Image (cartoon, rainbow, N blue to C red):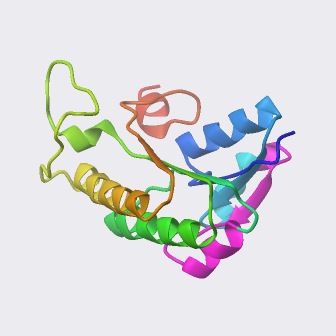
Amino acid sequence: MSNETILVTGSGGFIGGWIVETLHLRGDTNVRAGIRNWSGAARLARSPVKIVLCDVLDKNSIAAALEGVTCVIHCAVGTVETIVTGTANMLEVALEKKVKRFVHVSTTEVYGSVSGGIDETYECHHTGNLYGDAKLDAEAFCWGYYKKGLPVTIVRPPIVYGPFSRDWTVGFA
């Protein structure tokens, strides 16, 4: 097992839960599942992973969850405040704790309605879509902390679906 300890925020959700399960099954990292409250632990409790409270709106909760962590995969989502302020809080504490890598899971919603091919050079702008605009604001914080020396990566997945996905799998079934 490597010396890397990875905290996944939003682990009670679809993407965060899948990342925790996948990292655990790989077996080469120490994975820590960050959840906002204990009701989000049901799915994760099936695996022998460390589950910690990590409310992204509470810097003390973040600091405790980040103790000994080398990498953060930030998947927490919710209200605009959770997305924007929560991301800013996570970045601030991660920089203080000298985290070696911070991966922010954003969305292709930051592009707005476009057709045709786009890549990371495509200019993003606010469109009035609350979710996309909040993710874009969170990305701005990421770039600010990157400039302060925190190694940040932003990923923008499109529609994701599979087991435990309420919106794109369970709802259709």
Count of all numbered marks drawn on residues in the image: 0
Task: Tell me which residue sits at (58%, 45%) in the image.
Answer: 16
Task: Tell me which residue sits at (43%, 65%) in the image.
Answer: 148
Residue 94 locus on image (x, y percent): 57, 66
- Viewer-proximal residue among 158 and 30: 30
Query: Is 62 located above or below residue 157 in the figure?
Result: below
Query: Is 5 located above or below residue 115 in the figure?
Result: below
Q: Please identify the quadrant where the N terminus is shown.
A: top right
Indicate left or right for 102 with 155 as reference: right
Indicate left or right for 52 with 62 as reference: right
Query: Is 75 located above or below residue 89 in the figure?
Result: above
Residue found at the far top of this picture: 116
Query: Is 73 located above or below residue 51 in the figure?
Result: above
Residue 47 locus on image (x, y percent): 82, 43
Q: Is residue 62 magenta?
A: yes
Indicate left or right for 67 with 12 as reference: right
Task: Tell me which residue sits at (23%, 33%) in the image.
Answer: 121
Residue 19 locus on image (x, y percent): 63, 39
Task: Tell me which residue sits at (54%, 40%) in the image.
Answer: 15
- Viewer-proximal residue among 94 and 111: 94
The magenta-colored residue range is 45-66
Q: Is residue 148 magenta?
A: no
Residue found at the far bottom of this picture: 60
Residue 27 locus on image (x, y percent): 83, 34
